[in-house]
Image: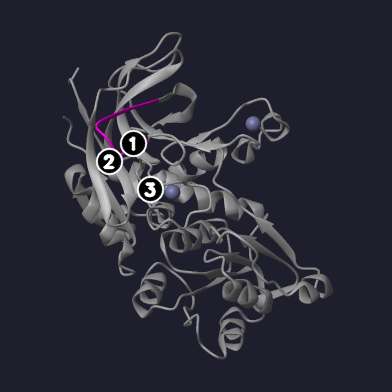
Amino acid sequence: MPQQIRRVLVRSLDDIVIEHVPPPSPGDGELLVRSSVVGVCGSDIHAAAGHHPFIDLPYRPGHEAVGVVTATGGGVEGFAPGDRVVVEPNLHCGRCAPCRSGRYNICQDLKVFGCQTPGAMADLFTLPADRVHRVPDGLTDLQAALVEPLATPMHAVAKAGDLTGRTVAVLGAGPIGLLTLAAARHAGAARIVVTDLLEGKRHRALRLGADAAPPADAPDLTALAHAALGGPADVVFDCVAREQSMAQGTDLVAKGGHIVVVGVGTAGTTPVRLDLIQDREIRVEGSLMYTTEDYRGAMALIASGAVRATDVVTATYPLEEAARAFRASLDPEQVKVLVTVDGP
Ligand SMILES: [Zn+2]
Ligand SMILES: [Zn+2]
């Protein structure tokens, strides 16, 4: 065991450093895991910028993590050193009403590993054994690093019910938007439009199978999207979650349709067209993170080849250059930026 491990500390976007701390040791029911690949999430960028409603600075990031078990704490069964695992970072109480009903992603006392607790952007980390999944042999570490980012869209798509033959609009072509496109297509959506402000991101959406990708600021966006879909969208996935995207979603969606809010909104109030929501019986529903089922679905989708790491991972940096990885993630042309950890 090393005397010290490296761990990333984020004080602000311009102040991201490596701290050297004693290695953690696994408590009862916990695993000690050596990090292999850790993703930088959109929520990490919001947090580093001081804009995330639920992550306080400074914090120690890394919730999209793949690693190898190096030791097990007391009472752990089913894992052994050498097992490759992917983290499911929602730390839930297991006792509240949502937890008891299986919706532990909205636990009343939810904490997220790597957001409210020290995360995996480090040489080693500990985590309760029930918060990791074994990586199937067929998946590479790079593919496994996409399981967490894909699980969020899997959960959102499941909210929309059976998508077979239905029309979909995805607002925002960042990582979550692109993976929502893949998940919705896999779920049987007939036609999908993806909107974004940036041309490069719209082109990527088209390459990944969108039927159309109009500019999010097109004055005739609704007409363009309706033309591409053959009418209003049965389901809108709002991966932007701002006033403008909610207004667009309300315009784009069919009467009796469904708007699933996937993006993280800003703290505070966001105006919405309540008159239209009422008049058109539009259902607006939030979607937060995922549960085990979504992880299983995400792993199967990646294993099937429907989501390829090469389409989504646009840069990787070693742990020592985590600050550069964060900076790279700010570049809108990047999709998923990963940090690789080579061991102490
Ligand atoms: Zn994330
Ligand atoms: Zn709970």
Label 3 CA crowd tier, 10 Å (few <14, some 14–19, many 20+): many
State whether residue 232 appears in this view: no
Where in the image, quadrant-wise, is ligand 2 located?
top right
Question: Which quarter of the figure is the N terminus placed in?
Answer: top left
Q: Which residue is mark 3?
A: 146
Q: Residue furthest top?
A: 74
Q: Residue at x 24, y 48 (%)?
A: 322
Whole-angstrom CA distance, mark 2 to mark 1, is: 9 Å
Q: Which residue is mark 1?
A: 120
Q: What type is the residue that disc 3 sits on?
A: Leu
Q: Earlier in the sequence, mark 3 or mark 1?
A: 1
Label 2 CA crowd tier, 10 Å (few <14, some 14–19, many 20+): many
Vertical relation: 337 (above or below) 74: below
Chief SS of the magenta region: loop
Where residue 176 sits: x, y (%)? 46, 58
Q: Residue at x 58, y 36 (%)?
A: 110
Q: Residue at x 47, y 72 (%)?
A: 210
